[in-house]
Image (cartoon, coloured by chain):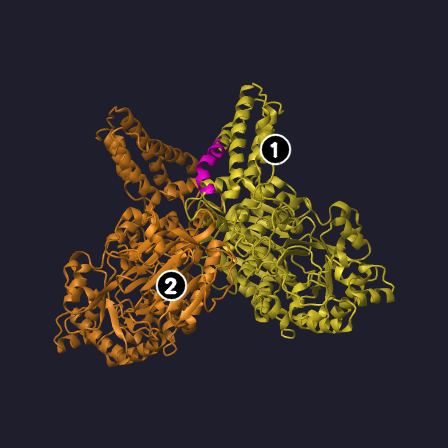
Chain colours: A orange, B yellow
Amino acid sequence: MKRLPFPILFTIILTARVIPQTEHTLMPVPEKFFFGTGVLLVDSAFSVSLSGYIEPRLERAATRTLARLSLQTGIPLSGTPVRSGGRLEIHCDGPAEGVQSAIEDESYTLMISAAGARLSAARPYGILRGLETFLQLVESGREGFHVREVQIEDKPRFPWRGVLIDVCRHWIPMDVLKRNIDAMAAVKMNVLHWHLTEDQGFRIESKRFPRLHQMGSDGKYFTQDQVREIIAYARDRGIRVVPEFDMPGHTTSWFVGHPELASAPGPYAIERGWGIFDPTIDPTREDVYNFLFAFIGEMAVLFPDPYFHIGGDEVSGKHWDANPAITEFKRKHAMLDNHDLQAYFNKRVSAILQRHGKRMVGWDEIMYPDLPKDIVVQSWRGQKSLAAGARDGYTGILSYGYYLDHIRPASFHYQIDPLGAEAADLNGDGKRRILGGEACMWAEFVTAENIDSRIWPRTAAIAERLWSPESVRDTNDMYRRLEVTSGWLEWLGVTHRSSYPLMLQRLTNHKPIEALQTLSDVLEPVKFYERPRARRYTSFTPLNRLVDATRPESDRARVFATRVDEFLADPERKKNADLLHRWLSVWEANHAKLEPLLSSSGILRETVPLSQNLSHLAAVGLKALESLQSGKEIVWDKDTGAMLDDASKPHAELLIMVAPAIRKLVEGAGALR
Amino acid sequence: MKRLPFPILFTIILTARVIPQTEHTLMPVPEKFFFGTGVLLVDSAFSVSLSGYIEPRLERAATRTLARLSLQTGIPLSGTPVRSGGRLEIHCDGPAEGVQSAIEDESYTLMISAAGARLSAARPYGILRGLETFLQLVESGREGFHVREVQIEDKPRFPWRGVLIDVCRHWIPMDVLKRNIDAMAAVKMNVLHWHLTEDQGFRIESKRFPRLHQMGSDGKYFTQDQVREIIAYARDRGIRVVPEFDMPGHTTSWFVGHPELASAPGPYAIERGWGIFDPTIDPTREDVYNFLFAFIGEMAVLFPDPYFHIGGDEVSGKHWDANPAITEFKRKHAMLDNHDLQAYFNKRVSAILQRHGKRMVGWDEIMYPDLPKDIVVQSWRGQKSLAAGARDGYTGILSYGYYLDHIRPASFHYQIDPLGAEAADLNGDGKRRILGGEACMWAEFVTAENIDSRIWPRTAAIAERLWSPESVRDTNDMYRRLEVTSGWLEWLGVTHRSSYPLMLQRLTNHKPIEALQTLSDVLEPVKFYERPRARRYTSFTPLNRLVDATRPESDRARVFATRVDEFLADPERKKNADLLHRWLSVWEANHAKLEPLLSSSGILRETVPLSQNLSHLAAVGLKALESLQSGKEIVWDKDTGAMLDDASKPHAELLIMVAPAIRKLVEGAGALR
């Protein structure tokens, strides 16, 4: 984050008092900004005008901005932009290319004074980004609603800032996609990576090969009209749509209607489990490439984006090994292993894509010496893999560290940098080949009901990493702004907050949820791939348990841990003592309130140990707190140690996130046996 | 509420233990029901079958039921009904008429045992009602989700159970209407009274006279396609759509494009204020009736319902009196007053409606001796007016006592009975002419954002009054079930609960809302027509203040008052003492927390006196509580009396609803000077 060199643009700033420049709630943080002291009112007379280059997309964006201002403030506003003299003047220099490329000029300048606001940009993308900044600046103050005086010059650090949404493992309908596109745009992301085919579902209509979606989707697929609708919706918001058709593995659902593409004889059924499965496209037969040529041709017309994702990950190889024709093919072509065979497949697919005017994107596994250099590698392996590719001349994007289904805190994602770790040593050319990153929302454990709560607000931290200057890395400040951003995102219809009480109400039969929420607020789902280890899941398994309702990051636990550290750091042991006492008392008393509900409910019964452990933890925490304040050391008994150990283990696929901080208190108060 | 005579249908009931028959959460309460002890599981294998008479509407209802079950339980369920052997078997005897009449057979029988459920009805309407009952029975228990064993025989007390939605004074868009139709169906209401034209807006497309909507709506109107969409949506849920075109008054918006219809020369502009306005159709000219014949003809085709509402209320008469041609017309036709002239107008319109095959509905004012007896009078005046009409042979529906914009508690609406008060003395024929009632949502003080919170959950109490047996009148039990119903309604997408924290967050700039909500939870907006007395409102006035966010009924205050009464009734003064102490302490401390926010916000500043008064009230409440427990009487000073008086007055158009109960405590503790 840099400040503008010397504030020359508004004379008011020459006389400005010192303004706390960090006390804004913008997310992502702009490259350069300087706040003034005045405000520009947002009242019933607020208006927006467009000048310079005008296109329907910009007019719609201006209209949408007025509607969103109206929603944010509750002030009725006239629904259309005017030609000149708006309180917010938008000026765009010229058009962008018809199809959004991976490297667009998204820069903008936003100047707000008490007299008016001016948003200018070379291209429409800058206007779209700047409008989101303007909307984030709206707040209420002494005179009603306003935006503060500010000068902003902003542009993204990385040009590719995406979210992958897997609509296959669980079906994610249109309205959920649209509201997530809105939220992505709000934090200046610009790629929807649409994971459309999987073992568990073929989720897009093919008019050329209708057996694909008809037999591979249980009727849950996007029609081509719907696909066009999503693309237009995203385009209006400056978001590219990159489709992924994962191949040659992850293709079971293709084979239900087209077993002739597979490496092993059928029949095939839609896969219902989670994991890596053996069904694989047969890469040795010409009719398979004829099929792919026709299918990719159909999809290449439907999706205007220059990039086309072919997946390429997690090929088990078993069906290749078991097929004599395939092993013979490998022998004949002097292929040493299945990696060679997959590289052959990729080269053939790459050629098909080139014929259809597309550049190939794939996961790490596609990297192979003689693939063309214009492909893009999406790395789940990390910056080392990405950097190696970049040195070889390959373009790459990072997804390692951005897997939302791993249920890691925002702070974890926030510190992952596409140009961090091994990529930090790249030279200028190498660095330029790292285009950005994508948050990945794999859908084994999300449904339309709770997917928003897994994407938001954590993805806003990733968006900031990809947009803002590298120097923006204050985690506390990120959390301060994330809290505001999270509330603010609700204006866009994402249900990351509102789904939580509803899912808890389901569990309590619409009885009061307070006690259950007291528990749930300090819990988090288990991490990485631990859920399928805990029990057998399929696509039929209801995701309606406490683990599905509980939010991925416990703000309460994060704040509690900070307060405990501050308390322990205070030599007088006074700081936060009352607060900690109050919270611990609530947790201690909670199990008695909650137990009747939990034990009478088949679906909640599994959480009894968590509720019990939270009470026990809080009880020893209170004891420790008193000891620390009085200075009398405690010698803890064995049971306390055993309880602390148990409380740090998952139950019902949930973890008590205040356990480590309470252990700190306990260990501070005396030795544990 | 009657129980079934002797439980002969399930042998299990012969051996049943005594079951608490009131511990259900059905709303409205069915006519007859008897719960058994077992349960029918709702799990992944749940299915629905249709037999007997089957129509697409029933198939869609069954499909929707599965989707809603899936939403309520979080269990993925197969999306389509089967032909036989479903765990829920639906059997309909035969079809209804193509167009839903005002008197349909809506009765149904629902039999649920551990082995399966059977819903049967003579007509599709009974099936639709019974499915809602089934969905309300779903709860979670020891074995996951289930419905309890029950025998229900149910039918409505009144055939006309409606909600009027005014889409004119503020614009209410399609999605808001649809979700409210869903919620209406959920509590078995069956008429959407669509108030489509007003001084402030002509909200429907007329292809015959496009200047009506083009010039009279600011572009905010329903296209005829959208109207058909709403009618079809409502029909699918067994809900009639009765359009209202208010005339000859309330017609300013008509005259913007058609000043030639008016009694005074134009030009006219859309009215922006609230109240009763003078612009009135000229009832003396034949070209006006030619216009109305053509316009009503167009609308009569668009709306299939046999009823057509012509409003007819609040004609000021000033423009009639000021027009010499009109006074001359009155003289010539020996009309004594404007009431005679309006009756003449109504007769002419009634004849037009008859020519188009419609029956006229209007407000009390249309009643006049020689109107045809097939009209329906909607009474805002009350049962006396309704009963007088019924004695004269007129059919009627009640809206007096059901005005949601009066911001009265559910208990108030609940006790209003269309056959209560003066209507109780009607004979059988007279009573049969009272068809039911309609809740009225006039839109001066609601927008799309908060209209749901004004309609729900209170309208569910009105729905119960109109459906359930007259004997169902236990207010406490109503509130117990209303609380559950309110949460449950959220599955249908109505935002009556979720809009509240969002509107509070707007006021706090997305900072924590707890302290503001502590205040807001004990407030209610002022009643009746007090808001426009407090300040000048127009359709441009933002409805974004605390009064717009605060819910119409403070549950917290209602429960507090009950707890205070119980405390005072306890000779030992122990009952609830801790609870009252806790709540009063929170309120006492709240102002100190809230004051910085309130006084720094232009939009919240007006609520400082409320916050202060709540603190003061709570402080004297605590003092009174202690005195009552210790037995030491207090002599209150003058300031206390003055504060109590001020605290019972509105500030910022809001009332502190705990003030009366705190006054009771204070007066119990000693004399007030």
Chain letter of mark 2 equals A
Q: Residue at x 38, y 76 (%)?
A: A210
Which chain is mark 1 on?
B
Q: Which residue is mark 2?
A: A119
Is residue B366 in the magenta section? no
Task: Name the amino acid type tagged 2.
Answer: Leu
As drawn, is B116 to the left or to the right of B404?
left
Please name the amino acid that badge 1 sits on: Asp
Whether residue A297 is visible, yes or no, is yes
**Residue A34 left/right relative to A418:** right
Quadrant where the N terminus of chain B lies?
top right
State the image quarter where residue B359 is shown. bottom right
Query: What main secondary structure does the magenta stretch of the protein show?
Result: helix
Q: Which residue is mark 1?
A: B645
In percent of width and height, residue B12 lies at: 56, 46
Q: Residue at x 26, y 38 (%)?
A: A645
What are the residue bounds of the magenta stretch? B585-599
